[in-house]
Amino acid sequence: MSNNFEKNSKGFSFTALFLILLGIVFLLNNFGVLSWDLWQNLWKFWPILLVLFGVEIILGRNASVKSFVFLLILIFLVPIILVWNTFTGNPLATKKVNFEKPLGNLTKASLRFELPSTNLKIGNLNENSTKSFSGFLKYSQVLPKPKLTENRQFGEVEYKIIQENKKQVPLSNNIGNSGEFKLTSSIPLRLSFVSNSGVFDLNLKKLRVTEVEINSKTGTIKANFAKDFSTKAYFFTQASLITLTIPKEDGASLKIVSSFKSLKIDSTRFKQIDKENYKSTNFDQAAIKIEIEITGSASSIEIR
């Protein structure tokens, strides 16, 4: 047994190192630390494999000390270059930007988020608030500062919060931001979100949201709908977890134009009309209706 240990401990394998690093990346993907979208950029670094194999041949399997030193350089030098270089700044350091707009004489409003990767929480302002919305975003300093634009016309306004996706450092496309926004419940609202990946926590129970749309390649969607205001919801997504809570008083329809691994729905409340469509038993009689359409693919859909 000691002979086998000596044979296995003679040298360091860069093939083993590659497999370890690959496993770590997959692990971080599964726990949401890294977005799955990083593979769109990571493939560009495939020549590193040739470098690793070449170094292994040059150093030899028995050059354990040299291999260990090279491994230390590889582990510490690359993060230092990415994190502390003066050209891109530290991608782990964040900045915060606040957003706020008055309600004024608005009769309707729409709010659109265009963010490369995000974790957003949506809720409501106090009933006596004089704001149309208020919130903040925390973002990596290597990415551009999110900007707010508005288009106002005849008592209606369209707000857009946009963060341009300029790839200033490798894999910066996958560095996300986080934020929380509270919206007025005094006027009807339209909400839309566009993101490569994201976590969306939408508490619409006290909001007058006429329409909500989420277009995200990957991520998690959680939405709680109001019991006294009709809403149409459109979710365009892939490989996501979707959890929707609909008050029992509301009539509800669900159209799933997608593939999914798991669908959890109350069969006593919702009747399957055809392959794609479900309706609550009270849909035709209900004054308040929640109409939902899911397009793409999802690993799990749950309707509460």
Image: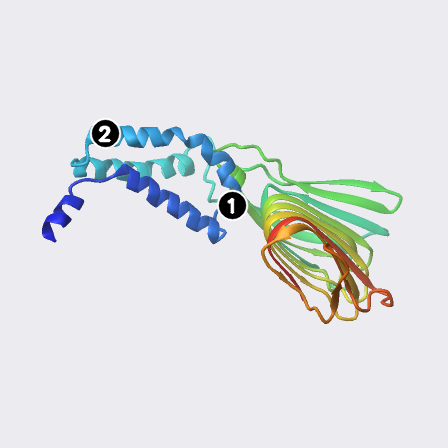
Q: Amino acid at mark 1?
A: Ser
- The residue located at (33%, 36%) in the rendering is 77
Residue underneath mark 2: 57
For this rendering, which residue is in front, 255 or 78? 255
Measured from the top left, where is residue 212 in percent x and y?
74, 52
Q: Amino acid at mark 2?
A: Ile
Measured from the top left, where is residue 96 in percent x and y?
57, 47
Q: Is residue 271 above or below residue 257?
A: below
Does residue 55 appear left or right of residue 95 in this picture?
left
Residue 279 image-quadrant placement: bottom right
Does residue 157 appear left or right of residue 147 in this picture?
right
For this rendering, which residue is in front, 283 or 249? 283
For this rendering, which residue is in front, 283 or 115? 283
Residue 201 image-quadrant placement: bottom right
- The residue located at (42%, 38%) in the rendering is 83
- The residue located at (12%, 46%) in the rendering is 6
Circle nearer the N terminus (1, 2): 1
For this rendering, which residue is in front, 293 or 148? 293
Measured from the top left, where is residue 185 in percent x and y?
78, 60
Q: Residues within 10 Å of mark 1 (few under 14, many from 20)?
A: many
Q: Quadrant of the C terminus?
A: bottom right
Residue 102 visible in the snapshot: no
Secondary structure, mark 2, is helix
Measured from the top left, where is residue 161 in percent x and y?
68, 43
Does residue 195 appear left or right of residue 280 in this picture?
left
Residue 270 visible in the snapshot: yes
Residue underneath mark 1: 35
Secondary structure, mark 1, is loop
Q: Is residue 114 above or below residue 87?
A: below
- The residue located at (19%, 36%) in the rendering is 61
Does residue 94 appear left or right of residue 242 in this picture?
left
